[in-house]
Amino acid sequence: MESYRLTNYNDSMEAVFTKLIEQLNSSVFILLVILGIAFYFIFLFGKWSQKFLHHEDKINNFQGLSDKIIELKTKVDLIYQNTNPNKLVASHSPISLTEMGKAMADTINADKILSEHIDSLVKEVELDAPKNAYDIQVVSMKVAKEKLLSYLNENNLNAIKDEAYAKGILVEDIMTIFGVLLRNQILKNKGIPISDVDVHSNGKD
């Protein structure tokens, strides 16, 4: 009888331990799955962070390269203006119209054309948020060369092209006249002397 009770007790204990192990195995399995998922997401997060930092470095490098390209283009423009026998602007700082440039401005009615589009052109300059007189000069030249043509009517555009052909120069050269006039107008509106261009062209602050 005692042996029977002992056998039943052992069977009961074995059943309890078996059930406990099964429960522990399930819990451990679930825990391992949770830990595996957690490590996977941590790994992905690390990869994403690394990729983001890599892209951020690329963006910073691209912006630095863009600034270098603008600086190089400005220098090339200055060299071109210095060596062009029919130059319309004098490339010293601050940039100003040559006698030929002044005559050309009168011929194409540059002041009148500029006055018709001054508000739009000033907005284009302000989009670059120039910080000083030198910046205003650089951006004014850029806007005059890259934006003004799209504002011109057919008569004004043809007149400018005819003058460019007659003088053996580029239409872009004539746009520099508008760049100077636009710069002058913006500096006047802001109460900044034109001579300040020379101050900032050295420090570029």
Image: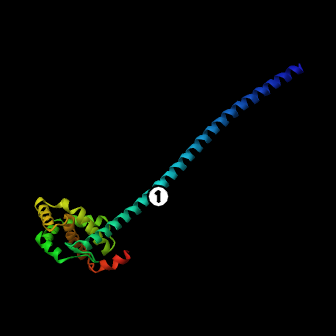
Quadrant, the C terminus: bottom left
Locate residue 120 relative to residue 3 in the image: left or right.
Answer: left
The structure residue drawn at horizontal position 24% and vertical position 62%, both measured from the top left corner, is 146
Question: Can you identify the residue that label 1 sits on?
Answer: 57
In the displayed structure, would residue 43 be above or below residue 125? above
Q: Where residue 147 appears, x then y in whole percent?
A: 23, 61
**Front residue of this view, candidates 120 and 20:** 120
Q: Residue at x 36, y 63 (%)?
A: 69
Numbered disc 1: secondary structure:
helix
Q: Examine the image and state in which quarter residue 32 appears.
A: top right
Going by the numbered disc 1, the residue's amino acid type is Asp
Determine whether 110 is above or below 10 in the image. Answer: below
Relative to 184, is 48 above or below? Answer: above
Q: Position of residue 55 (x, y in %)?
A: 46, 54
172 vs 123, nearest the viewer: 172
> Label 1: few (<14), some or many (≥20) within 10 Å?
few
Give the percent coordinates (x, y) of residue 157. Answer: 14, 61
Is 51 in front, or is 189?
51
